Image (tube, rainbow, N blue to C red):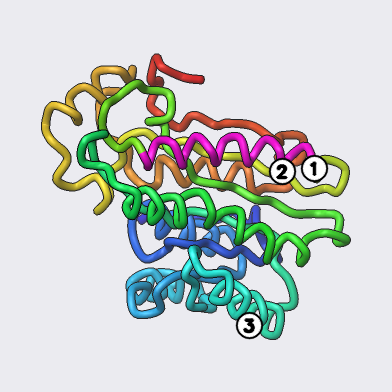
Amino acid sequence: MATINSETHAGRVALVTGASRGIGQAIATGLAERGAQVVLGGHVDDVGETTDRIAKTGRPALTVAIDVSDPSSISAARDRVTSELGHVDILVNNAGMFEAATWDDLDYNLWQRVMAVDLNGPMLMCKAFLPLMRGRGWGRVINVGSATVAIASPVSIAYRTAKMGVVGFTRALAATLGDEGITINVVLPSLTKTAMSEGLPEAIVKASLGRQVIHREAEPADIAGSVFLLAADEAGWITGQTIMANGGNAFAL
């Protein structure tokens, strides 16, 4: 792992959901390396590796149990964060649920489960934690979507629909908070080497890489870099934007 000498996010409190592995782990670890006090939100039993990585930065992370589909779980997490740290400066809504169902395989229960995590989750997190930013004159919300929203495909219908909803949610919330010093943006990763992408058919992987000008799968750190940029002081004039972290995919929005 490269040594980070910059303190670009020093003094900031950053809450990252879905931080146990993959993109979320890279975001959480990188923010800690850049000086932030990181809060890991998710299933407590799953974040041990991320906690260990962050501990090496000399800034131990706070771990809070959060089910992003459960308002009461989010409320309890907010109360704990408020009690221990007082506020949140940076909120990264990264937790997600992937499905690969076709229309014929998709049923209402699966649709609802995906929407609960991938679309309702960011809204509920923002409802709970934005009050800790408002009035302070500074805040950063970065939602993690998916570059698949720009691609026509007969699979992952619920997932693609939810992630497109996050784009609309991001823009509407940015318009709401534009004069309060709080920016709201969404990062759309292309195919990334994570547990979520394991087991994808070779044809899908080949097609995805063929649409990019950088012909390889993204590493989690490739996606995390966009989040670090959007979470920085210098990014205060960027809001309501869809950042396509997709290796130059020709199907950009």
Q: How many residues crowd around disc 3 within 10 Å: few (fewer than 14), some, or many (20 or more)?
A: some
Does dot 2 land on a helix, a strand or a loop?
A: helix
Residue at figure coordinates x 47%, y 35% from the top left: 188
Q: Are marks 2 and 3 in contact (CB under 8 Å)?
A: no
Question: Residue 3: in sight, yes or no?
Answer: no
Residue 106 pos. (x, y %):
27, 42
Q: Are marks 2 and 1 in contact (CB under 8 Å)?
A: yes
Identity, as a three-letter code, of the amino acid under mark 3: Arg
Residue 84's disc number: none
Quadrant where the N terminus is found in the figure: bottom left
Q: How many residues crowd around disc 2 within 10 Å: few (fewer than 14), some, or many (20 or more)?
A: some
86 sits to left or right of 188:
right
208 sits to left or right of 138:
left
Residue extent of the magenta highlight: 158-175
The residue furthest left is 202
Does dot 1 land on a helix, a strand or a loop?
A: helix
> Foreground mark, 1 or 3?
1
Residue at figure coordinates x 33%, y 17% from the top left: 213
- Which residue position is annotated with label 2? 173
- Tell me which secondary structure the magenta stretch mostly adopts: helix
The image quadrant of residue 153 is: top left
Using the numbered discs, state the Cα–Cα distance from disc 2 to disc 3 in whole angstroms.
25 Å
- Mark found first going from the N terminus, 1 or 3: 3
Does dot 3 land on a helix, a strand or a loop?
A: helix
Residue 176's disc number: 1
Count every numbered label the image shows and give the total: 3
29 sits to left or right of 203:
right
Identity, as a three-letter code, of the amino acid under mark 2: Leu
Q: Is residue 94 above or below residue 192?
A: below
Using the numbered discs, state the Cα–Cα distance from disc 1 to disc 3 in whole angstroms.
27 Å
